[in-house]
Image (cartoon, helix red, strand yellow):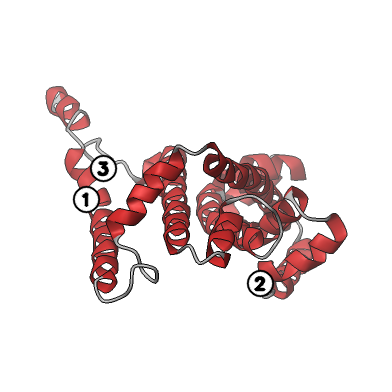
Amino acid sequence: MNPSYSKVSRTKPKSGSFWRKVLPYLLAVGSLLAIWQITALFLPSYLLPDVPDVFVRLFSSIQDPEFRGHIGDSLIRLLWGYPLACLFGALLGLIGGISKGFAVYLRSLISILQAIPPITWVPFFVILLGFGNKTIITVIIIASFFPMALSVLNATEGVNRTHLELARVMGASRRQLLAKVFAPESLPAFVTGAQVAFGNAWRSLIAAEMVGGAMAGLGFYSRWRGEVADMEGVLMSIIVIGTIAALLDLVLLEGLKRKLLRYRYVQPGGDE
């Protein structure tokens, strides 16, 4: 291959690829806002405020330390519960790869417990742990543990048998099998499981805050605004909740996915 051609291919601008990814989301958001605004024309403002009014309220609230505190409280809980769930889920899923008995047990446990909506655990943990961060973080862990563990567990069943037998012939211990065979080959499933687990974690966080698990956070703020019939505040909190989730998922997690699984996105010319 011509070296100069290869170099040009690697430095080819990626603006077209960027807009192919971003444009569908912009169109989706724009269509939702248009439907909202059209509907608002036929309803009283106290039932459904206009889009500009809610965004004016949003820009004003972002400058309010109290509202920013609610956002911070929710993010802190997420940053505690979500990584712990991913860690425990991935670890137990990998252990299931080297122990068939444990894999059967773990799969049975998941099939029983994942059928229970995470929000139903809130009253139990409120009694056990009290109101506040402990209860909500525990609910987040429960909600996001199952998809991560199941994803990694399924991946261990698809590990290349040749690699596994070769490692055993060379005298690899169970710990070495985990680190050198199961973990690398389960990486794509780990990334996928992490994205699914994030959705569960974020929804359970907001729901737990709404039903009384805490006296601060975005879920609490939304419920509080609803109790005083502040529709602008309710819609504003919905926008913030959706925006934060989209940014964390589409920017942070998707970026991490592309770094860890870079080989899947590299085209023959060198572009992603």
Mark on residue 267? 3
Look at the numbered disc 1 and give the secondary structure of its residue: helix
Q: Give the residue type at disc 1.
A: Arg
Furthest-top residue in view? 4
Q: Position of residue 162 (x, y in %)?
A: 57, 52
Q: Nearer the viewer, mark 3 or mark 1?
A: 1
Look at the numbered disc 3 and give the secondary structure of its residue: loop
Q: Give the residue type at disc 2.
A: Pro
Distance, label 1 to label 2, CA atoms, is 36 Å
Q: Residues within 10 Å of mark 2 (few under 14, many from 20)?
A: few
Distance, label 3 to label 1, CA atoms, is 16 Å
Residue under circle 1? 20
Residue under circle 2? 117
Look at the numbered disc 2 and give the secondary structure of its residue: loop
Q: Give the residue type at disc 3.
A: Gln
Can you say which quadrant of the picture contains the N terminus? top left
Residue at the location (32% across, 55% down)? Answer: 53
Q: Nearer the viewer, mark 2 or mark 3?
A: 2
User: Above or below — where is 121 with respect to 247?
Assistant: below
Of residues 252 and 209, the one nearer the viewer is 209
Distance, label 2 to label 3, CA atoms, is 41 Å
Looking at the image, tell me whether mark 3 or mark 1 is earlier in sequence order.
1
